[in-house]
Amino acid sequence: MKVKPIAEVIGFLEPYAEACGVEIVDAAWDLRARSLTVYIDCEGGLDIVTCEKFHRAIDAPLDELDPTFGEAYTLNCSSPGLDRPFKTERDFARHIGDKVEIHLYAPIHGAKYHEGELLSFDGETVTVQTEKGELAFPFDKCAKVCLFIEV
C-alpha cells in the first residue's frame, strides 16, 4: 500500500488538532494492518470523549487528503500512553520536576539506564538530578527518555 509521508499527514492535521484543543504527539502507519494511528494528548489528560471528538473532526478531511491514494485504511486515534518517549522540547518542558528514566545506546556515567528528576532540556542535553548528583546526557545518545512509572 502506497501512503503519504507521516510528516505530511501530521502537518495537514495540525489545524484540526488545534481546533479540538489537542496536540498531535505522533502518528504511524501500520501497512500490514492497513491503518493510520494518530497519537494525541491534551492539557489535563486525554479521555475517550476527546479522542472521539478529534477522530470525527479529522475523518472527512483525511478522505479529502487521500493519504492512501484511494485504498481503504482504518483510522485510529489514541493516547500515546504514560511510557511514551519524549520527542519534543514541549514534552520535556511539560515534565520539568518529574521523575524520568533515561535509556542510553551506550553507557554514560557508568550505566545505560538512569533515573532522576528532570531538571532541564536545552534541545541537545538532558539534565537530571540523580542519587549520584546532577548528571547531563547528550540527547542524541539517548535511546529513550520517558516518565518513570512506579509500579
Image: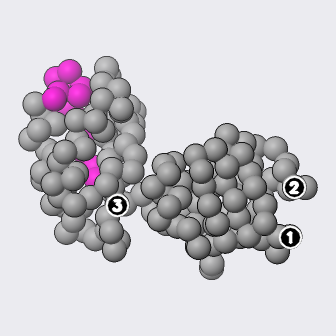
Kindly identify which residue carries mark 1: 132
Image depth: mark 3 or mark 2 in front: 2
Q: Is residue 100 visible?
A: no
Q: What element carries label 2?
A: loop
Residue at 22% from the left image edge and 35% from the top image edge = 12
Direction front: furthest residue: 122
Find numbered disc 1 in the image and state the secondary structure of the residue it sits on: loop
Q: Quadrant of residue 80?
A: bottom left
Position of residue 105 measured from the top left corner of the image (x, y, whole percent): 75, 43
| Disc number for residue 41 | 3
Residue type at mark 1: give it: Lys
Mark 2 residue type: His
Give how far apart the Cα atoms at labels 3 and 1 are.
33 Å
Residue type at mark 3? Asp
On whether residue 91 falls in the magenta region, the answer is no
Crowd class of label 1 (few under 14; some 14 to 19; many from 20; radius 10 Å): few
Q: Of the residues under marks 3 and 2, which one precedes in the sequence? A: 3
Query: Which residue is identified by label 2?
Result: 109
Residues at marks 1 and 2, CA–CA distance in whole angstroms = 9 Å
